[in-house]
Image: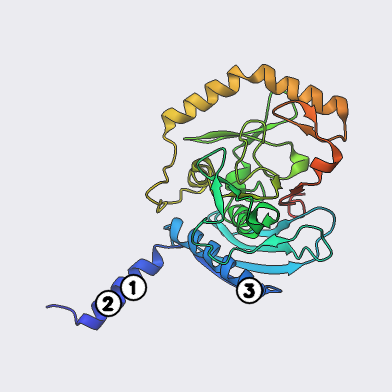
Amino acid sequence: MRRPLLLSIVGLCFSSWINAAIIDARVSGFDDAELSVLSHVTQFWEDTIADPITVKVSFAMRNLAGDLLGSSFGFVQNARGLPKEATVEIDSREGAVFGWFVDPTPESAEEFVAGSAPWHYRGKRSNAAAQQYDLLTVLHHELAHVFGFTIAYSRFGSRVELADDGFLRNYIGDSVTATLAPDYEGTHLSDAFHAYDLLTAFQGRGERMLPSDLDLALLADAYGYTLNLQSDQSVPEPVFTFAVAFALLFFSVIKRWNTATFRAVKNRWVDPIHQKQIPSDKRRSKRKACNCDSISVP
């Protein structure tokens, strides 16, 4: 016997609903334009993670201390070790020289040109996007933490080991590996090994970064997520990870050199790729993107 058409439609909708992530958002301090960007970013993550997982996220726009652009904390996992709850705070940029670029068309990147990686863009010089910090990027960064890129969740944290140099850390997964920044930077990728990635600790003005293949592969590896990828997205295959592992081994000397240089200059900001101190006027063009999991980790 055939089911009534209405019941069939409801069934299809319910089937689609249970096979997608849901962000149960509570939002304060965002204006309408900022809410539009937030809605676009949350929709991306709900569309990308095709698993029946609901995460309660409190979003707040307020004045953050120091040079933070955003912060994620209060991570709670469910009985299966999957994300359940978190808090995201975004700096209001009140009183700051450089504010937010709030994209009026967040579904496109028409204010940007291609950057140094497929997921990296630079603002056009004639556009406000070139001078401000990109709100869309910071929201993507924080939601990547919420959906699992943090050692506060046991599934991810159990795969993180201290590197041989005793300074950096490695994520060692079943199908992907990555080099993480030192623990005092929170849970972030090392910008010396993963330059221009969304999940490094610092963001420059005039830059847009979207979730990279590596970012999504790490989350899928740690949590078993099924991903609905866009046509131009792909998760690295295990063969690729062997190449990454070989590259990490090949450049281990450079890594030690980077570490020694960092320790030698102590608190000075050093460009980890070109090994030269960044002048103070240039240094202020970058801000820490996140103080992720510093509260949650004992």
Q: Which residue is the site of mark 3?
A: 26
Residue found at the very far left of the displayed protein = 1
Residue 160 location, x and y as percent?
A: 63, 37
Q: Which residue is the site of mark 1?
A: 13
Q: Which residue is the site of mark 2?
A: 9
Q: Compared with residue 98, is residue 173 higher up or lower down, i.e. above or below? A: above
Q: Earlier in the sequence, mark 2 or mark 3?
A: 2
Residue 92 location, x and y as percent?
A: 76, 66
Three-letter code for the amino acid on which mark 1 is drawn? Cys
Left or right: residue 63 compared with residue 140: right
Residue 121 location, x and y as percent?
A: 57, 46
Q: Residues within 10 Å of mark 3 (few under 14, many from 20)?
A: few
Is there a contact, CB below 8 Å, between mark 2 and mark 3? no
Judging from the image, the colouring scheme is rainbow
Is there a contact, CB below 8 Å, between mark 2 and mark 1? yes
Q: CA distance from mark 3 to mark 1?
A: 24 Å
Q: CA distance from mark 2 to mark 1?
A: 6 Å
